[in-house]
Each structure stands twice: as structure tokens, then as C-alpha cells.
Image (spheres, grey):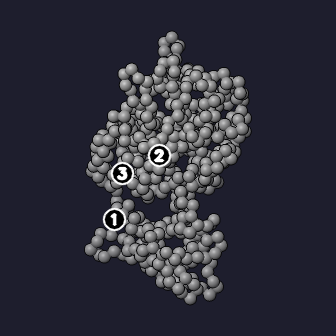
């Protein structure tokens, strides 16, 4: 703690705790470190509150702590050394320099309770300003947004989406990689494992049938998960020959049999490609993605007498980015796994639970990493897919990705998190970033996993 001449009892006397009125305050340490803690007069300097690294900002640590009414002093314990933030209000006392802030009630004429988003916005202390925040008792119910406001917001967004077209999703420059259906599955696996064939971090590619002169489908990481899972279930290790003798077209036909998509004569039923034209409005494009359960919808320009032109791949992230230009998470059950779980169990969970990612947690259910469908592509390194997947752990599978693609291992890029108290706009802005498809909802401080919210959840809420 602080120097031996510091008197915690003396500091405690400066804080009024009557009435159990507490303010949840967000503290921020923006100067880096390996381990960062917080302590202050609000907890009598007797507790070190752990601070969590902000995803995407490796030098920024934050923690939310409920403090009582009054004037407070606090300091950060960074890598074993007490420090203060010079960019926030501070003063010199007999035991050193401490940061300060006031938690003060608002004037009597202003209602004591404000909407949760306003309270949180007003209580952040990371901008270095002194704050006046409204009193919120622990047992007081937080007000909810009215149904009328929700309906009005949905209507405004629906009108915006209907007024804008898929053409507006096209970047100024870029490329889209397509694969021929005659390509062997093995080659497709290795091609998609390359970063250049990932769309917003998702390994996938539209499929072109040269004989028919049109795009006929999309191959994704889910296809490789199904292939490996079938081989695991049949107690067979994958051989080079098995992948070299199957084209993408043959696999798609076999997949139809596997899912029972056959006609009365036992022949596979061709699955029509779901695509959008550049002139379709964004609401229709979003509904196509949601209703078909796909990650992307190709934007294809068709003109009589000419080959189809593949212009772009529309995704919910791209559409959300458009929505964010105008300035509740899912309550469904979610699954978690430990690092020691087998890779085959992770693949089973991805398929059977119809999810695209699984939070990987420690013994305290705190977030460690995330295993996603796209992580299957890391098995291409060293042909690890030929090994027994029942004996490979999730930790080993994630390590393969780290070894084959160093940026892949940056936890701040892979483990995107949010709090239950984050505003919808803040969540939307995070999900609109390239490569971010879901946010793990965690408890402030402990990073204990509480749920997941995804692009699909946001759009079901907005368009529901």
C-alpha cells in the first residue's frame, strides 16, 4: 500500500457513507503496464481493485467501482509501484501525490434518477474533469426505455436502410476472391487459410462454376468443420488422398446428402445462391442475411449477354457501419469451454449449438480467449488436420493460429468485450469495426463471462 505514515482511518473520515448511496464510477489508467490496480479513500485504502485492459487499447486499463458521496482521493498500483495520473485532477498531500474527484449530488430541482446511459456517460472520470453525478441507491430500479422510444428508433433505422442501397457498401478499392468448384477441397482449405482470402476476418469465398457460367455458392470455415467432424465421428484420421480426391463440387453434393437435402429420387437438390443486386436496399439485404443464416451475401451485377460481375460481399458489419453514420443483448443460452477441452468438443459445439464462436474461460469463468469458426483454418499449418482432433486441445489449436499468423495472437483483437451497461450506440460502433462480429459481455473488473452479443442480435433487435 502507501507509505507507513499513511493513516487509512484518517482518510476514511473524509467520506460520507450514510444511506448506502453509491455511484458506479469508471476509472481509467491510460499509461500501460502489465498489472494495474486501483485503491482510494472510497475503500479506505484497504483493497486493491483489479483493472482490466481495454480491448484494442493495450495501454489503457479500466475498472468500475461504486463509491459513496463525497470528495475522494485515489491512486493506481502499476506493476508493484504506486502512481498517479497527471492528466487527471491531483494534489499533493503529506504521503505523496494523489488523484482526486468529487461525487456530489445534483441540485434538488433536478430529478435524482436519470436514464442509465446518461448516468454512465456523466460518471466517467477518464477525461480528467470533476463530475457532479446524481444519486442512485443500490435497491432502486433503473428506469427502462419506453416502448414508444424503441418503436420510434426502429422506424427511423428501417427508413434509413430502405433509403440506401447495397451499392453504397462498395469500397473505393478492394478485391473479392472467388474459387472454382472444380478445385480440390485440400487446395481450397489452404487458400482460405491465407489472410488475403479473408473477408473482414472471415475465411470464405464465393464459388464459380465455369461450366454453368455463374456463381453457385459460397465455401466457408463451416464446410471444413463439417468435414473434420464427420471424419472424427467415423473414427478416421484425415489423409491427403481423401482431400485430394474430392472437389468442392463433390463436397457440396455430399453435404446435401448429409443434411438430407434430396428429392424423391434420392438426388441432391441444388441449393440456389443467395445474392443481392447493387440496387437492392440495405434492409432487404440485411433480412436476406438474417433469414438465410449466412455470414455474407454476394453483391452481383447481372446484365443480359454478359458474365455476372461479383462486386462485393455484403455483411451485417458493413451495413451496421452505414447505420452508425447517423448517429440488450441476446438472452439465449451460451456455451463456454476451458483451454483444456478437446478441439473435437469445440467443433461439436459450434455445429450443434448453431454458434459462430465460443468463449474460452479459466476456472473462475473469466475470459481468456475466443475460439471461432474461422480458427479452423489454422489447422492448415503443418497439416494439423491430419491429427487426432480428440487429442488436440483448444489451447493447442489457438496456439497454431498464433504461430502461423502473429497478429492473430493479439488478444485485444480477438477478445472484443463490452459491459451490460454499455449503450447500444457504443456496442454498434464496436461491432462496426472491421473483423468484429461479436462482443463477449463480461463483468467489470473480473472479466467473468456473462453472455455474447453479435451482429445478428443487433439486427434482430433493430428490424424485429
Which residue is under mark 3?
A: 325
Q: On the image, numbered disc 2 is attached to which residue?
A: 454
Looking at the rendering, which quadrant does residue 226 occupy? top right
Say above or below: 96 vs 360: below
* Count of labels in the image: 3
| Circle on res. 114 | 1
Give SS at disc 1.
loop
Give coordinates of residue 348: x percent, y percent: 60, 36
**Gap between marks 1 and 3 measured at Cα:** 26 Å
Q: Which mark is residue 18?
A: none
* Label 3, label 2: how far apart the Cα atoms are: 19 Å
Q: Is residue 235 visible?
A: no
Residue shown at the point (43%, 53%) measured from the top left = 429
The 10 Å Cα crowd at callout 3, few under 14, some 14 to 19, many 20 or more, is: few
Whether residue 197 is visible here, answered yes or no, is yes
**Compared to 302, does 342 lie above or below?**
below
| Element at label 3 | loop
Check the picture and name the quadrant holding the N terminus: bottom right
Amino acid at each position: 500500500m502507501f507509505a507507513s505514515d499513511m493513516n487509512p482511518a484518517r482518510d476514511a473520515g473524509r467520506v460520507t457513507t450514510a444511506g448506502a448511496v453509491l455511484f458506479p464510477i469508471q476509472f481509467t489508467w491510460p499509461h500501460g503496464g502489465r498489472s494495474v490496480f486501483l485503491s482510494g479513500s472510497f475503500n479506505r485504502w484497504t483493497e486493491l481493485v483489479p483493472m482490466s485492459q481495454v480491448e484494442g487499447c493495450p495501454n489503457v486499463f479500466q475498472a468500475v467501482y461504486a463509491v459513496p458521496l463525497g470528495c475522494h482521493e485515489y491512486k493506481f498500483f502499476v506493476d508493484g509501484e504506486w502512481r498517479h495520473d497527471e492528466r487527471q485532477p491531483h494534489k499533493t498531500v503529506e504521503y505523496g501525490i494523489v488523484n482526486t474527484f468529487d461525487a456530489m449530488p445534483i441540485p434538488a430541482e433536478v430529478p435524482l434518477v436519470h436514464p442509465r446511459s446518461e448516468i454512465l456517460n456523466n460518471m466517467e472520470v477518464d477525461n480528467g474533469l470533476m463530475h457532479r453525478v446524481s444519486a442512485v441507491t443500490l435497491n432502486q430500479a433503473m428506469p427502462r426505455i419506453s416502448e414508444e422510444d424503441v418503436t420510434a428508433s426502429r422506424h427511423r433505422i428501417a427508413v434509413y436502410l430502405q433509403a440506401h442501397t447495397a451499392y453504397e457498401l462498395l469500397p473505393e478499392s478492394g478485391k473479392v476472391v472467388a474459387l472454382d468448384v472444380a478445385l480440390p477441397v485440400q487446395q481450397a482449405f489452404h487458400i482460405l487459410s491465407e489472410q488475403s482470402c479473408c473477408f473482414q476476418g472471415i475465411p470464405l469465398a464465393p464459388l464459380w462454376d465455369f461450366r454453368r457460367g455463374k456463381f453457385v455458392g459460397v465455401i466457408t470455415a463451416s464446410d471444413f468443420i463439417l468435414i473434420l467432424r464427420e471424419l472424427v465421428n467415423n473414427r478416421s484420421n484425415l489423409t491427403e488422398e481423401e482431400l485430394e480426391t474430392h472437389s468442392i463440387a463433390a463436397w457440396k453434393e455430399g453435404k446435401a446428402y448429409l443434411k438430407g437435402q434430396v428429392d424423391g429420387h434420392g438426388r441432391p437438390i441444388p441449393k440456389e445462391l443467395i445474392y443481392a443486386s447493387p440496387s437492392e436496399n440495405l434492409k432487404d439485404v440485411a433480412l436476406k442475411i438474417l433469414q438465410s443464416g449466412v455470414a455474407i451475401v454476394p453483391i452481383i451485377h447481372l446484365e443480359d449477354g454478359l458474365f455476372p460481375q461479383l462486386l462485393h460481399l455484403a455483411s451485417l458489419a458493413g451495413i451496421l457501419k452505414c447505420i452508425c453514420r447517423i448517429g440488450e443483448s441476446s438472452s439465449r443460452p451460451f456455451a463456454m469451454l476451458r483451454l483444456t477441452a478437446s478441439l473435437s468438443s469445440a467443433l461439436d459445439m459450434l455445429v450443434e449449438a448453431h454458434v459462430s464462436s465460443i468463449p474460452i474461460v479459466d476456472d473462475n469463468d473469466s475470459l481468456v480467449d475466443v475460439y471461432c469458426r474461422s480458427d479452423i483454418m489454422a489447422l492448415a499449418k503443418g497439416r494439423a488436420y491430419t491429427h487426432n482432433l480428440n487429442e488436440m486441445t483448444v489451447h493447442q489449436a489457438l496456439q497454431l493460429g498464433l504461430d502461423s499468423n502473429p497478429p492473430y495472437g493479439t488478444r485485444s483483437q480477438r477478445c472484443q468485450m463490452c459491459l451490460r451497461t454499455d449503450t447500444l450506440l457504443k456496442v454498434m460502433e464496436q461491432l462496426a469495426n472491421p473483423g468484429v462480429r461479436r462482443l463477449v459481455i463480461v463483468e467489470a473488473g473480473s472479466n467473468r463471462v456473462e453472455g455474447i452479443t453479435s451482429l445478428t442480435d443487433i439486427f434482430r433487435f433493430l428490424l424485429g
